[in-house]
Image (cartoon, helix red, strand yellow):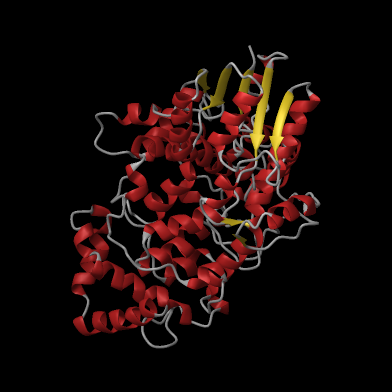
Amino acid sequence: MKTLRLILGDQLNHKHSWYHNDDDNTLYFIAEMRQETDYVKHHIQKVVAFFEAMEAFADWLRSRGKKVVYYKLNGQNNTQKLGTNIAALVQERSIGKFEYQLPDEYRLDQQLKQLAKDLSIDCEAFDTEHFLTTRHELAEFFDGKQSLLMESFYRHMRKKHNVLMTREGKPEGGKWNFDQSNRRKWKGQPPIPHEKGFRKDVRKTLKRIEAAGVKTFGNIDPQNFTWPTTRADGLKVLRHFCGHLLVHFGDYQDAMDPDQVYLFHSRLSFAMNSKLLHPMEVIQAVIEHWQANRDSISINEVEGYVRQILGWREYMRGIYWKEMPGYARSNRLDNQRDLPGFYWTADTRMNCLHHAINNSLDHAYAHHIQRLMITGNFALLLGVHPDQVDDWYLGIYIDAIEWVEITNTRGMSQFADGGLVATKPYVSSGSYINKMGNYCSGCRYDVKEKVGENACPFNSLYWNFLAEKREHFVGNQRMAMMLNLLDKMDPAELDALQQRAKQVIHSPDNF
C-alpha cells in the first residue's frame, strides 16, 4: 500500500521518527502554495526563508533515498491549495493512506481534519516531535487554578525536564528567575560581535515569488541572504551564539539601540519555529557551554535565555491551543482605530518607531522589547484594532507563526485578552524607552516634555490611555499606583495631555 506523507513548511524536523519508519511505498509531499503566501501579506524575507528551507529539506530527504514530490510555486500541477493538491496526488499515485503531522496553526488543523474526513482512504495524524509539551498540557496544568501565571508553569517545566536544577532539586544559582538582573541599558560597551551570516544567493527563489505576483513588503538583498535555512546553518548560528553572544545576552536582552540590529540575541527563532532545530538541543548546548565557562558567564545570562524557550515559548503555545479559536477575536479594550501607515514604511519622526520599524523592514526582525515596548506599545496607546496589529506582526517577522505571534500580540502586547496572559497592559511613556534604549537623544521630540509640539507623543498617549481605559483596570492591583496618580492629576494638566494625545491619534502619520 502506498502512503502519502505531508510535510508543512514549518515541519522541517530532521530528527522525526518518520524518516526511520518508511519504505519504498512512502511518498513525501512538500509544497509552496499561494494559500500560505496570501492569507496575510508577508515580509519578502519570510517567504524566501521558508521556501529556501523547504527546498533544502526536500533535497536532504532525497539524499537519504526518500521519494519526494516537491511543488514549486510555479509548478504546473500545483493547485495552490493544500486540499486539492493532496486529493489530486491521492488519485494520481493510487495512494492507500494519507499521513500528516499535527499542524501548529488552528486554521491548518481544521483544514486537515476536514480533508481527512473527505478522503476515501485511511488517514492518520502524528505528533511533530518538536515541542516540550503536548498541545493541551498547559490547560491541564492550570485546570482548577485561578490564574495562568507563566512563572509557575516555567518552574514546572524546569522540574519536568531537569533543566538548570541541582542534584538536590533546587534551581541553579538559588533563584528560579534572574529577570531583575537582565535589564541593563547598552551604552556602547561591551562590543557586539557581528552576527553569523551566510551570504546566500536566493535570486532564483525571489524570482519565482515575484513572477507569481505574490504581494509582499520589506527589503531583501538576494545575493546576501543571512538567515539560517538549513539545519547545518542553524547549528552554526547556535555555536556562534554560545561562543560569542551568550556571555552578555541576559544583561542586555531588553536593551535597544538604533544602530544595532541584533545586539546579543541569538537569531535562532526561525530555525526553531521551522523545526530545523529542536528546543531542547538549543537549551542543552547553551547550558553545556555555560558549565564549561562558569568563570566568565553568569547564571543570569543562561537562565534568561532558557526562560524564553523552556518557559515562554511553550507557555504561549499552550495558551494558543487552550484559547483558540476565540482568542483570535478577542478585543477586550474595544480598540477600533487603524494602524498608522508608517508601520509599512518607517516614515515617522519618532526616532524609536522609525528605527524599530526600519530594522524590521530591512531584516524581518526586531527583538522582543522592540516589539513589545516600541511598536506594540504605540499601537496599544493609539487604540489600534488588534486584527490590524495581528496582521502586521504575523507578516513582518521571519519567525512569526500564528501559534506564537497571536498570543504575544493579543495577550502580551495589546492586552486584548483582558489579562489572560499579562497581568497588566504593557504600556509606557517615553521614560521607559529612554531608560532601556538609545533612541531619545537623536529624536525630533523631547522625551521630558509632555505637552506642546516638541513633546514626545508617548507621554500624552500614555496618560490618555489610562484615562480612556480606566474602567478596565479598576481592581487591578498592578495598575493601582498609576490610576491613583491619574486621579490626583490636576484636571487642567490632564486636559492638556489629552488634547495633545488627540492630535497624535487624529493624524499619527504626521508625527
Is residue 36 something one can see in this rendering?
yes
**Number of numbered tags placed on the structure image:** 0
- Give the image location of residue 123, x and y in percent: 51, 19
Determine whether 434 is above or below 46 in the image. Answer: below
| Image side of residue 332 versus residue 168, left or right | left
| Image side of residue 226 versus residue 86, left or right | right
- The quarter holding residue 216 reads bottom right
Q: Residue at x 51, y 53 (%)?
A: 40
- Give the image location of residue 484, x and y in percent: 21, 66
Q: Residue at x 48, y 25 (%)?
A: 116
- The quarter holding residue 339 reads bottom left
Which image quarter is the N terminus in? Answer: top right
- Give the image location of residue 249, x and y in percent: 60, 49
Determine whether 22 is above or below 266 in the image. Answer: above
- The quarter holding residue 15 reads top right
Q: Between residues 162 and 505, which one lies in front from this camera angle? A: 505
Q: What residue occupies the far top of the structure in this picture?
A: 1
| Image side of residue 255 versus residue 473, left or right | right
Q: Between residues 193 and 173, which one lies in front from this camera angle? A: 193
Is residue 511 something one can see in this rendering?
no
